[in-house]
Amino acid sequence: MRTIREIENDKRQAWARMQELFGAARDAGRAMNGDESTEYEALGQTIDGLDTEVRQINEHAERERQLGEVRRDDRLLPGAPGNEREARAAEYRRVLDRYLRFGRNELDPADARLLRTGYQAHDEAESRAQSTVPGTAGGYLVPDAFSNRIIETVSVFGGARQIAEVMSTSDGREIPMPTSNETAVEGRRVAENATATATDLSFGQRILRAYIYSSDIVLVPISLLQDADFDIEGYIARKLGERLGRSMNREATLGTGAAMPLGFTVGGSVGKTFASATAITYAETVDLEHSVDPAYRVGARYTFADASLAALRKLVDGNGRPLWLPSTAGLDGNGAPATFNTYPYVVNNHMPAMTTGNRSFAFGNFAEGFKWREVRGITVLRLEERYADAFQVAFLGFARMDASVVNTAAFKLGAQA
């Protein structure tokens, strides 16, 4: 595999060539011709591919670090002193791996008792990690390292979780969230000895619930489970994360709030309506940014679909300079992320496309205005008999989350005409 320095050199060379192509057309007072545009787009895709390569190296290094450590799991082992808790967490993970590969019948009594400390029955009103009642209607809590790998995949296959303020709770009770918009409210100058005016704070309320999401069934050949060199935890975590991520992200982005999350494209307010039904201009991006109060432009970012990013990468400012800049982040995480008009962005492919009436862009400080609530603990079920005739075992994952807009002043939406 290439080194991170070699990848960064390739990125710089590609970006230099993109600037050369664009600058030649700009200096000649014309748009790029067909060949130039084709090469420009291909170079942009090359940079995207190099960014993906860097991300994969980072992810691999992080997994090596995680798997080389003993991870503490306070959920499963409350009250245990430090060294004992770490040892028991490692032991729980060993037993869970055996359960995933061979099922509960292959566990000895001691292992079965340890696994039951993480049992969850799905007909219970709340998760009870200390339940000791065995059964086939429930599943088992997964250790933090396994859970984190699923959550990382959820973020990659989404975007909404990356921009939101994430709240992790230990149970699924409803959480009333106050909503408030004070950007138009000011104090006032008063005369000496005058009585101050009373202006009450204005609050609304959103309720964060814990909707249940299923990964659907993931089939795994038993031959793979029997292979000691096969990373069964990684495979299952990736597949469950992809499926849960897509379903949760869709509703966190587009949900109506009726027995589902209130997506930010639905609950947010429009700050700028573009003149075109299928395009956006530099001036309109400036208007969208300034529709957000300056207090919320600190820490602001964009979010949009990948097809919209392709359109933005062709935009230039009043001096003909591209508004999009590639990432300079390396293996150590240092360096700037890719930006549009100096602001970082998150790609979310559940954002609406740039077509008539769609809210295709969002900009602002989403951490102040958009909340993502998840109930700590992802549950995995192993279905042994249903697909036995095909020499397969099925896995099923469940997660609980909700999302809602709590401050419409913190971010604004850009809508096509």
Image (cartoon, rainbow, N blue to C red):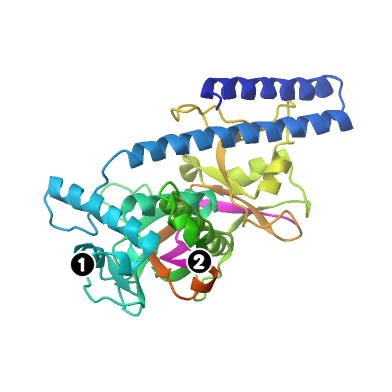
Q: Position of residue 349 (x, y in %)?
A: 63, 53
Read off the residue under disc 1.
Answer: 109
* Circle 1 crowding by C-alpha within 10 Å: few under 14, some 14–19, many from 20: few
Quarter of the figure that contains the N terminus? top right
Q: Is residue 259 left or right of residue 28?
A: left
Q: Secondary structure at mark 1?
A: helix
Q: Which disc is residue 331 wearing? A: none
Identify the residue at horizontal 78%, vertical 51% (top origin): 276
**Residue 377, visible in the rendered structure:** no
Q: Position of residue 120 (x, y in %)?
A: 31, 71
Q: 171 or 393, which is in the foreground? A: 393
Q: Is residue 387 above or below residue 405?
A: below
Identify the residue at horizontal 62%, vertical 57% (top origin): 350
Whether the residues at callouts 2 and 1 have beta carbons within 8 Å, the answer is no
Point out the stretch of residues depicted in magenta: 392-417
Q: Secondary structure at mark 2?
A: strand
Quarter of the figure that contains the C terminus? bottom right
Read off the residue under disc 2.
Answer: 392
Q: Amino acid at mark 1?
A: Pro
